[in-house]
Image: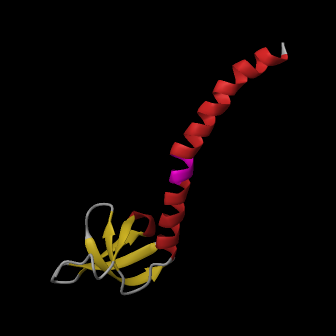
Amino acid sequence: MEGNVWGIILPYVIIFAVFYFVLILPQRQREKKTKAMLDSLKVGDEILTIGGIYGKIVSIKDDVLTIEVGADKTKLKIARWSVRNLETPSEKKE
């Protein structure tokens, strides 16, 4: 009877372990990196929003960022969570 129980439980344990290492662990690492990036935003950083808007941060108040976009420096207020990534000088196209 004891061997039969392990024969039933073992495949479920293996499947859970595979899901954990293939899906859950990488997602947690991505979330950690994203949270660190959002927490490190500062005035003057150039960003890309989830909507595809490139801008430069001009002010930060709690979870609301004010960014300048375009040649006429239009100001937009966006939520901090809507930042996709921080543009580094090497990624910036002149």
User: Which residue is found at the position 50% from the left and 66% from the top?
Assistant: 33
Chosen colour scheme = secondary structure
Looking at the rendering, in which quadrant would you find the N terminus? Answer: top right
Q: Is residue 19 above or below residue 8?
A: below
Q: Is residue 29 above or below residue 74?
A: above
Q: Position of residue 42 (x, y in %)?
A: 44, 83
Q: Which stretch did the figure color magenta?
A: 23-27
Residue shown at 51% from the left, 52% from the top: 27
- Residue occupying the point 40% across, 86% down: 43
Tell me residue 68's x, y (percent).
Answer: 27, 81
Q: Return the residue nearer the eye: 66 or 84.
A: 84
Q: Position of residue 22 (x, y in %)?
A: 52, 44
Main SS of residues in magenta? helix
Q: Is residue 31 left or right of residue 69?
A: right
Look at the image and say whether residue 10 sits in the magenta stretch. Answer: no
Which of the 4 image quadrants contains residue 53?
A: bottom left
Q: Residue furthest front?
A: 3
Please state the total of marks drawn on the protein image: 0
Looking at the image, which residue sits at the far right?
A: 2
Task: Say whether residue 76 is left or right of residue 21.
Answer: left
The residue nearer to you, when weighing 82 against 9, is 9
Q: Position of residue 29 (x, y in %)?
A: 53, 58
Residue 3 vs 28, above or below: the answer is above
Q: Residue at x 36, y 78 (%)?
A: 66
- Quadrant position of residue 20: top right
Of all residues shown, which one is farthest toward the top? 1
